[in-house]
Image: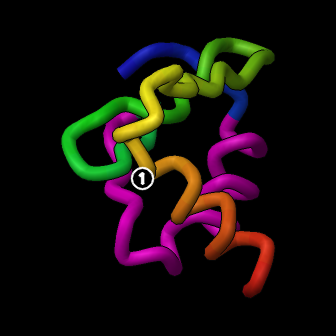
Amino acid sequence: MGNYNPDHKVVLDDMLLGSPLVRPGNSAYYVGQKLCICLYEESIEFVLSHRRSDLNWHFMVSYLRNN
């Protein structure tokens, strides 16, 4: 596990783990088998797919906006 701000993880856990689409890792979150968010020291990296066929991210964002 890498070094990251634990406060960031608390907030992201609260936002993301209610979604059945999201799976947590040690310092990351996955949608399906794909990495979508990484925690680094004092930053958060969002990994967005440029492929139109990869809709998991869109479903997750929609879910978060509606809950």
Of 30 and 55, which appears nearest the observer?
Answer: 55
Furthest toward the left, the residue is: 33
* Residue at x 48% of width, y 75% of height: 19
Of 39 and 4, which appears nearest the observer?
Answer: 39
In the rendered image, residue 39, in percent from the top left (x then y), is placed at: 59, 25
In the rendered image, residue 54, in percent from the top left (x then y), is placed at: 38, 40
Work out whether 60 lies above or below 3.
below
Classify residue 14 as left or right of residue 33.
right
* Residue at x 44% of width, y 50% of height: 55
Classify residue 7 as left or right of residue 17.
right
| Quadrant of the rendering where the N terminus is positioned | top left
Label 1 crowding class (10 Å Cα cut-off): few <14, some 14-19, many 20+? some
Of 47 and 38, which appears nearest the observer?
Answer: 47
* Residue at x 55% of width, y 61% of height: 60
Residue hosting label 1: 56
Q: Quadrant of residue 29?
A: top left
Furthest toward the bottom, the residue is: 67
* Residue at x 53% of width, y 64% of height: 59
In the rendered image, residue 41, in percent from the top left (x then y), is placed at: 68, 13
Classify residue 52 as left or right of residue 62.
left
**Magenta part of the protein: which range?**
6-26
